[in-house]
Amino acid sequence: MKKINSIHYGGKVLLVGGLFLSVFPAGIMGINQILNNEILSTVAKIVFLIGVIIISFFFVHLAIEFRQDKKIDQYYLSHKNVKIQIQGNGYECGACGSRNLKDKSKWCYVCGCQFGEYKDKTPQDIIGK
């Protein structure tokens, strides 16, 4: 599964869901008070239901994202003293995140961490590509 990241669109989804959940139904019901039309009452209920569906799907999406973040955090906490291979031929320090490491590096040039042996899956293998 690909890593989910809702930083750039999470607020927009909540705004649209909130509009469908409260603003649009309230406006339709206000117009319905003036016109007293049964169709508008049904439309308001449908719009409210669309808002509930949008918000529900977003919270499921957010729960998956939080679970992925927790797995990634646990992974990096258990791999602090290793250099982790990243895309291409680069390596990253498990302690400070420095990406200025070479294949032969025995310690991190930034934080001074001594590297142990790496015998686990890469982060991309755990969360998906």
Image (tube, rainbow, N blue to C red):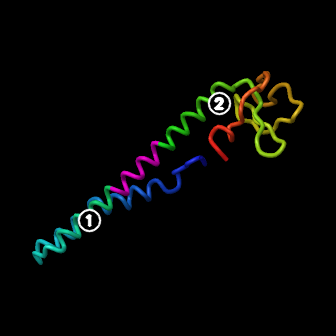
Range covered by the magenta-colored residues: 53-63
Mark 2 crowdedness (10 Å alpha carbons): few <14, some 14-19, many ≥20: some
User: Which residue is at 62% across, 41% downward?
Assistant: 127
Residue 29 lies in quadrant:
bottom left
Q: Contact, CB < 8 Å: mark 1 with mark 2?
A: no
Q: Nearer the viewer, residue 110 or 65?
A: 65
Image position of 129 with respect to 75: above or below? below
Question: In the drawing, does residue 70 fall left or right of residue 14?
Answer: right
Mark 1 crowdedness (10 Å alpha carbons): few <14, some 14-19, many ≥20: some
Question: In the drawing, does residue 61 fall left or right of residue 110?
Answer: left
The chief SS type of the magenta part is: helix
Residue under label 2, please give it.
Answer: 76
* Magenta residue check for 72: no
Tag 2 secondary structure: helix
Q: Residue furthest right?
A: 104
Tag 1 secondary structure: helix
1 or 2: tag closer to the N-terminus: 1
User: Which residue is at 42% across, 58% downward?
Assistant: 13
User: Which residue is at 49% across, 43% downward?
Assistant: 64
* Magenta residue check for 55: yes
Residue 3 pos. (x, y %) = 59, 46
Task: Specify the amino acid type for callout 1.
Answer: Ile
Image position of 80 with respect to 26: above or below? above
Residue 114 pos. (x, y %) = 79, 21
Task: Specify the amino acid type for callout 2.
Answer: Tyr
Of circles 1 and 2, the one toward us is 1
Q: Specify the label residue 46 is tagged with.
A: 1
Residue 108 pos. (x, y %) = 80, 28
Q: Nearer the viewer, residue 94 or 57?
A: 57
Image position of 126 with respect to 47: above or below? above
Question: In the drawing, does residue 13 fall left or right of residue 35?
Answer: right
Using the numbered discs, state the Cα–Cα distance from disc 1 to disc 2 in whole angstroms: 45 Å
